[in-house]
Image (cartoon, grey):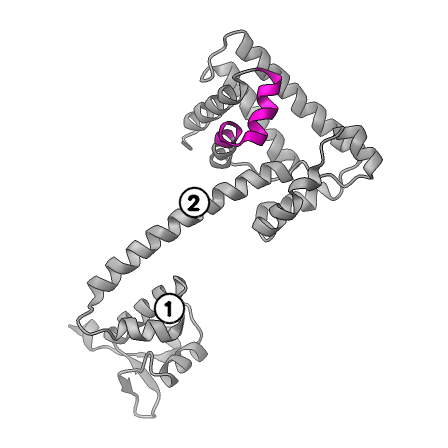
């Protein structure tokens, strides 16, 4: 009962909600959230019902609703907190699904974009032959140019020399070669040998480009099977290799408790 009768000053409410006092003043001016009381000096005081309304407002705001629409929603007759929470949960589930799709796309383009090199055309050809890493650059930059991994990869690779890139290519080729040998020799994808090799692959990405967590690695492994561009790279080395690598990555992540 004490909680229900207690009131809070605007500064404390702003701190609790993670918004500015100016935001609360604006919500008051437009009638979206008017404080239920005033102090003896005329300062705004908010009770628990005001805080509940603010929570609903901020949740809808986070979901991308404009303030005018939020006002109509929270003032809708017969709509209580339970209805709002149910509606918001459904909207958040949709957002989570969309973010998962975006994350998968980011991981996919990150794996392509990590092939980018800061070399002259002649040096680039000496390293990669006819492969053109710039083919994926515009889309990758648009999709995740502001991401931490993108920034980290750009920071690291911007200082790489031709010798660095040749070393990267040789290291990646050696890992791939040993994966082919393991598969050909009948080593199970979930065995120690295959898991050790894909762990080397994960470490290779983390050391040279960006931190490749086991979760990200699993996403890359799935991409090696589902995306024609990457599947072709592995299948050109050995038929069935893309599936083998994917299964080994999953097994390695499971052992690490990440899948």
Q: Residue at x 38, y 47 (%)?
A: 97
Give the label on residue 230, or none.
none
> Which residue is farthest bottom?
41
Q: Which residues are magenta?
A: 221-238
Q: Is residue 238 left or right of residue 5?
A: right
Q: Residue 63's x, y, as percent?
A: 38, 61
Q: Residue at x 53, y 22 (%)?
A: 242
Q: Quadrant of residue 199?
A: top right
Q: Is residue 237 magenta?
A: yes
Q: Is residue 202 magenta?
A: no
Q: Residue 195's x, y, as percent?
A: 50, 20
Q: Is residue 148 left or right of residue 52?
A: right
Q: Nearer the viewer, residue 175 or 246?
A: 246
Q: Residue at x 32, y 75 (%)?
A: 71
Residue 225 in sight: yes
Report crowding for label 1: few under 14, some 14 to 19, many 20 or more residues within 10 A (C-alpha). few
**In the rendered view, would you say 51 is above or below 246?**
below
Residue labelled with disc 2: 100
Callout in the foreground (1, 2): 2
């Amino acid at each position: 009962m004490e909680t229900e009768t207690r009131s809070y000053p605007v500064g404390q409410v702003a701190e609790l909600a993670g918004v500015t006092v100016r935001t609360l003043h604006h919500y008051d001016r437009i009638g979206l959230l008017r404080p239920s009381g005033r102090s003896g000096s005329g300062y705004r005081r908010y009770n628990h019902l005001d805080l509940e309304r603010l929570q609903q407002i901020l949740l809808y705001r986070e979901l991308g609703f404009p303030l005018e629409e939020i006002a109509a929603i929270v003032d809708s007759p017969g709509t209580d907190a339970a209805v709002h929470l149910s509606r918001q949960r459904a909207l958040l589930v949709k957002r989570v699904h969309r973010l998962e799709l975006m994350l998968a796309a980011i991981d996919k383009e990150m794996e392509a974009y990590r092939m980018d090199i800061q070399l002259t055309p002649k040096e680039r050809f000496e390293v990669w032959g006819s492969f053109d890493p710039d083919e994926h650059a515009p889309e990758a930059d648009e999709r995740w140019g502001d991401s931490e991994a993108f920034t980290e990869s750009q920071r690291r690779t911007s200082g790489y020399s031709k010798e660095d890139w040749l070393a990267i290519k040789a290291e990646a080729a050696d890992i791939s070669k040993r994966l082919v040998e393991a598969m050909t020799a009948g080593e199970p994808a979930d065995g120690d040998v295959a898991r050790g090799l894909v762990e080397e692959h994960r470490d290779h990405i983390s050391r040279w480009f960006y931190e490749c967590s086991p979760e990200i690695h699993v996403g890359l492994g799935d991409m090696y099977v589902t995306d024609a561009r990457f599947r072709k790279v592995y299948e050109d080395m050995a038929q069935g290799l893309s599936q083998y690598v994917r299964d080994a990555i999953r097994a390695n992540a499971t052992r690490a408790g990440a899948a």
